[in-house]
Image: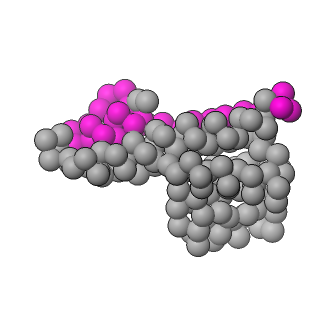
Amino acid sequence: QAIATALHCAGAKVAVLAKNGAGAQAAARALGDSARGYACDVGDAAQVETVVASVEREVGPIDILVNNAGTRRDNLLFRISDDDWDAVLQTNLKGVFLMMKHAARGMIKRRAGRIINITSVVGMAGNAGQSNYSASKAG
């Protein structure tokens, strides 16, 4: 929310994405009429492709992409299920790749744009019970 607010205050048109569409729309409403909220699972290629096209059509060209989605499913390494491992990497790592892949196309055509990927110190130092999160943020 703070990043979206800062960009909005700087004059950017803001699109807020979240798995929970109602949450994204509420966050966008808090910014004012020029912001839009969209439901999107950033780890799902089809959803990302669709939402990037929608944002570009409804809000305008994506000049700044901030990848800030993140999830955790903490557990000791030998207790992490395959599903928990995959879910964390799907959102935190593959989601970054998919958003960059689809948003960068327009940036390249316009020969302008910025991509900011938010990570975590845990990607460098690690924490007990967060091997999946650490791997996803070091990615």
**The residue stretch that appears in magenta:** 109-137
Q: Does residue 112 lie above or below 15 as drawn?
A: above
Give coordinates of residue 124: x percent, y percent.
Answer: 37, 27
For residue 122, say whether it is visible: no
Residue sitting at 18 percent across and 40 percent down?
Answer: 77
Q: Quadrant of the N terminus?
A: bottom right
In the rendered structure, the answer to whether residue 123 lies left or right of residue 48 reads left
Q: Nearer the viewer, residue 40 or 135?
A: 40
Q: Does residue 7 lie above or below 108 as drawn?
A: below
Give the farthest residue toward the front: 46
Give coordinates of residue 133: x percent, y percent.
Answer: 34, 41
In the rendered structure, the answer to whether residue 56 lies left or right of residue 118 reads right
Residue sitting at 63 percent across and 71 percent down?
Answer: 26
Give coordinates of residue 18: x percent, y percent.
Answer: 56, 60
Residue 25 on the magenta span: no
Residue sitting at 78 percent across and 29 percent down?
Answer: 108
Query: How was the colour assigned to the protein in this rendering?
Result: one colour
In the rendered structure, the answer to whether residue 81 lies left or right of residue 1 reads left
Q: Nearer the viewer, residue 24 or 58?
A: 58
Looking at the rendering, which quadrant does residue 29 occupy? bottom right
Residue sitting at 37 percent across and 50 percent down?
Answer: 87
